[in-house]
Amino acid sequence: MASKAVYLHRDPMLKKRDDFEDILEERRNSSDLRYALRCYTPILYKGVSPCKADTLKNMVLQSDQLHYVINQVSKEMSRAVDDIQEEASAILEEMAHCLQLSTVRFFAFTLSKVFKTLFRSICVNEEGIQRLQQAIQEHPVVLLPSHRSYMDFLLMSYILYTYDLALPVIAAGMDFMGMKFVGEMLRMSGAFFIRRSFGGDKLYWAVFSEYVKTMLKNGFAPVEFFLEGTRSRTCKSLTPKLGLLNIVMDPYFKGEVFDVSLVPVSISYERILEEALYAREMLGVPKPKESTSGLFKARKVLSEDYGSIHVYFGQPVSVRSLAEGRINRCQFNLIPRHVPNRPSEDIQSFVNDSAYRLVRAQEENMVLKPWVLLASLLLQNHHQNQASGQNPGMALDELTEQAVWLRDLSRQYGAFLHWPDHMPPPDVISSSLSLHRGLVKMSEGRVQLALEQAGGQAGPGEPRSTLATPEEELLSRAVVVLSCASYRNQALHVFLRPALLAAAIHTAASNQKQEVFNSFSFLRNMFSNEFILCPGATVQDFEEACFLLVKTGALQVTQQEVLVTERGHRTLVFLTSMLDPFLQGYQVVCRFLCEEAPEVLTEKQFIPAVRKFIIKHLLAGRLRYTEVLSSDLQKNTLAALLRLGAVRKIKGAAQGTLKVNKVMVNSLEDTLGGKLPTQKAVVARL
Amino acid sequence: MASNSSGGSSDRQRIAQQRLRIIAGHLQRPVDGDSAILAAECKAQGSQPDASSEEKTVPRRRQEIMKWNGWGYSDSRFLFNKKGQAEFTGKRYRLSGMIIPGLKDWFESTFGASLQHKTPATPILNSSAVHPPTLNETFIEELKSTGIPFSHDAEDRVFRAHGHCLHEIFALREGRFGRVPDMVLWPNCHNDVVKIVELASKHNVCLIPYGGGTSVSSALECPKEETRSIVSLDTSQMNRILWIDEKNLTAHVEAGIVGQDLERLLNESGYCTGHEPDSMEFSSLGGWVATRASGMKKNIYGNIEDLIIHVKMVTPRGVIEKSCQGPRMSTGPDIHHFIMGSEGTLGVVTEVTMKIRPMPEYQKYGSVVFPNFEQGVACLREVARQRCAPASIRLMDNEQFKFGHALKPQVSSIFTSFLDGLKKFYITKFKGFDPNRLCVATLLFEGDREKVLQHEKQVYDIAAKFGGLAAGEDNGQRGYMLTFVIAYLRDLGMDYYVIGESFETSVPWDRVLDICRNVKARIVRECKEKGVQFPPLSTCRVTQTYDAGACVYFYFAFNYRGLSDPVHVYEQVEHAAREEILANGGSLSHHHGVGKLRKEWMRETVSNVGMGMLKSVKDYVDPNNIFGNRNLL
Ligand SMILES: Cc1cc2nc3c(=O)[nH]c(=O)nc-3n(C[C@H](O)[C@H](O)[C@H](O)COP(=O)(O)OP(=O)(O)OC[C@H]3O[C@@H](n4cnc5c(N)ncnc54)[C@H](O)[C@@H]3O)c2cc1C
């Protein structure tokens, strides 16, 4: 039943979404102090009483699961059981949250103040809150917010506190612990900390998974974590990480709970606090270590207007319904459930599919602001003008016309667009532009990307270099382009499938449906590290893309053929242009691997080397998309090539040594460029 | 004691006489084919006045004393009287003739049912609605010469066309009859059965053994696709104890005897088998063997597989039996295990040698209240770990605890004491037990007095560690007494739009709580999804403990007003519940068997090879599928 919510509706126009309520409004009209001190009595799962942090720790340490692993490790390493027990205890100490209402109240107070200065509004769908409240009482709940900002989990807890809902315990990365004070504050507001990598550490894994499961099974609190694993620096959803999802589904597989509710939450920021930081990071300006002072500095600098936030609590997804007919739980009948076990293949693929569906559900309920459409149009315009050497920018009325066109198109594609329909379009546009002053400017009645001031913009708080090399200038322009791209990226999921089809039509040798499908399937496969494309859903995605393009009159699809209509031309040009930077980017990376990469290359060397290569091409004018400088794109390309077997990791050699199959990489590049028909190239072996 | 031992000695004489008769019978054994003398031999044996045969419970025409479309004796049933109070009619049971004041409220509030909305059963069996029998004339011709009584009367046939699954009884109440046996035979002894099986094989007639008819697995249902004449072989007249061996503590018994007769007759000699399935009033020794039955007191006496020393089964290939009565053998796979659980697919069990025990000197009931089900299960687990389970220990969940309360009769020495009310007060108020969470375990201790008291203390001490509070003998005794009348309650529910059933499983200890929670929740959810308008009753109890796990019973009932095909909905929910059981590590069945109801899960339960093994046994023993009830495989 609930699982259907995760699937795409046949006609996206019919998608029904809840209305929003601004929770800051009340904060502006009544006492924050009283709010922070008010009576807080959330209802818990099946009426269980909340569990003290220490009790929880004891439950974990005394669990059969942990005992088993402790004994195992003790035998393997010939160390005393007590020793290992102590180590487990220490791991737990380092990990565990210690939620304290007083800290929550402190945050409730301070965040009220902070949010009111930073944001115009924080809008929440209250029906989603009601569904959540219901879900919490019925089954253990897992909250799965999208991750775009450090703000996310404070914001989540703030909202749940506001609605008198049970506060979640949140899986957070260890890097927060670098910030001593903040780390402890976060711990006291319900965060628990996981090391970034603990690959083969059995004991760590056992403590960690048992800790999460104990909280979940007993319904002490909703468990919250980020499917994407880390903040998306590009505003594109990241391909999901499966570890924690596996852990929270496990109690259902093993019959320890009747069901688990997964609640995807979509948090959309009109302006992201970390906007410029992200761009710099992707361009190779090293990521500032997450230090307390850094965060404070960032906040101080960024104390301006960040527009509004929309938080959409999606339909709870029942793990039981998802698993129906897919997972035979009898597979756990023959081994004691406390013996750790590598998940079977069907479980792994089920968890993977579910993870994608959930990220798709997050995407679908992301609120898009008009600015997102403007950023898409301005970027496309920028690249076209650059190529044709025209005047930079677009006239305001031209931009308005195109924006209105795109507004209508995106709505037909089912976008969750918040366009104030009561305002005349030009006003909508100028107010959007003014919020993003750092990225766009108006000059001579034309709107253009704020590339000139880019140098100054790139590193707020840093002295502007006086003597900029061409490379430095390129990089500082790239900061603006990447920032803009991150807004465009917010809308990508709306256009992705039609865009893949448009690109497929473009590259396919003929209009034959089969051939177009082959191209589509190739591209989809190629980009499945880049975008959220559910595994095994090629046909479904193809049909959806056809459906949308046919519905909007851009395409005619017959039994055999796929034909672009007269009026469909504009749509297809827009769609292909949207995907083009990625197509070009992947080709450049391929070219690098064929032309410049040494025989053996380590993973570490890859990014700097490919960056150098791209800079060279950009400066020489052989490449127009600055955004391919994004390390995110470069990493995704490499991941795709690894997945396809065009690049291999050499076993036995030094960590992360790569071996490039140049013939294959070359043919992939040609296929991407439409120089090789898909069938001949790689489709056969995909 | 004195009377006991004298009873024992008179019994010894009786047995000696009986043995002589049997030996005489052997000497007289006729040459093959002389059926007239064979039948005469059986009759001679049966007509001996000593075996209290007048007191035997089951007449050939069962419908004379038992309901044709419900549970048990015709004179005993629940009804709501004119004042709207529930009462139980008849004189047979301790509850008979009593008013049960709490039942109406419980019934109405639990199911949302109302006494205004009735769904009475068709009162009379309409013979013309029964398909005329398909008779195999040559078979009948030869059968007549054996003198074995038979009938193709519609009532006799309908009575043997079903067990006690919900769908079976529901159809009867509506006066619907599917395929029913074409005739009923009453063999009188082993040799009669040999004769019948030979004739059936010769004339290709389908045989279905019928014991007590208490099957709850659709085992007795006639396969729709069967085109041959179907003959129901009613074992009820093979009901003698042929000998008792006090040296070895065994008794040799004909397989048609029903549990209550077996116990009563053995008791007369100072013995018992201790095998007491809840259906023991009506279920038969042969039925127990054929379904691998389990009795309430298995902790002392064992399940049927622990009780059997020797079995004789007549198959189309001939008679299968062991050559001696050694208590254990290493002679390859135990052939008894092909017989036990064969569910009438291989042949007819005719005679069984089983263990007997001296009747216990002392019995004591007891009960313990726990603050919640989790604690209760933990206590049972500990009792099992220490291997100190009483003869019976059962743990009811909260809903069943409340149900038990609703069934308290108005006045009775054993039922109420003024302390009852006080105790309730004590439990809920002083101990801080939540009346919506507490649960109760009922206990039965047996043995010599001293040991029982010692044992009792041990169990109560363990219970105390888990927050358990002794709640008196009355509560315990009432719990066990209700066992026998509870089956009658379903008929009452069916008079008022409420249908239900119980089903069971066995499960490792670490899964008990999970399976209870999940299956109950699944039932509730499925009912909702299938459009049931009222919340169902979905409850469970742990009824047996083992070293490595427990037997769990689920009870499930709902008000079906507003549903067009309630039985179908019921079956879908039960199906889902079984899937849930299997997914939670439970077995397909602990003791009810597979029959046709649970056949679809057999392969995954025993693996492909396991199925192949069972099939090849069937193919060898019964190549023409004479025992064609199509259970199990
Ligand atoms: C209210 C109620 C309570 C119950 N409680 C219990 C319980 O506590 N424990 C328990 O184990 N079961 C219980 N049952 C289930 C049932 O009583 C048992 O399965 C019992 O063993 C069936 O015996 P029966 O004589 O009634 O067999 P029937 O119902 O007549 O037959 C059952 C199957 O055995 C075959 N069969 C019968 N007799 C023979 C024979 N002589 N030779 C070969 N095959 C034969 C039949 O063909 C059929 O397939 C209960 C049932 C009900 C309705």
Image: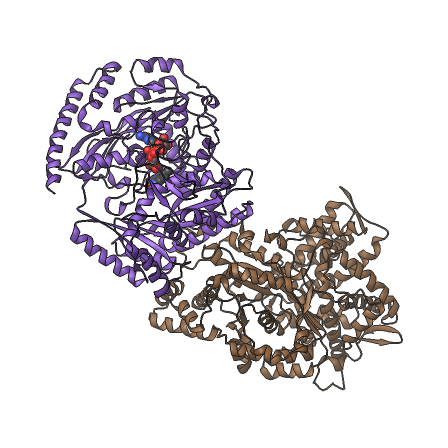
Chain colours: A brown, B purple
Q: Residue A35: percent from the left, percent from the top? A: 60, 77
Q: Residue A210: percent from the left, percent from the top? A: 45, 65
* B84 vs A302: above or below: above
Q: Looking at the image, which is closer to me, B246 or A623?
A: B246
* B584 vs A165: above or below: above
Left or right of B523: which side holds A675? Answer: right
Q: How many marks?
A: 0
Among all residues in the image, which is located at the extreme front?
B83
Residue A129 seen from this side: yes
Left or right of B272: which side holds A308? Answer: right
Left or right of A444: which side holds A499? Answer: left
Give the quarter the ligand 1 occupies: top left
Q: Looking at the image, which is closer to me, A286 or A90?
A: A90
Identify the residue at image location x=19%, y=28%.
B51
Left or right of B248: which side holds A10? Answer: right
Residue B343 seen from this side: no
Rendered image quadrant of residue A561: top right
Rendered image quadrant of residue A286: bottom right
Identify the residue at image location x=64%, y=53%.
A7
Q: Residue B296: percent from the left, percent from the top? A: 29, 44
Q: Residue A397: percent from the left, percent from the top? A: 88, 68
Q: Looking at the image, which is closer to me, A477 or B225?
A: B225
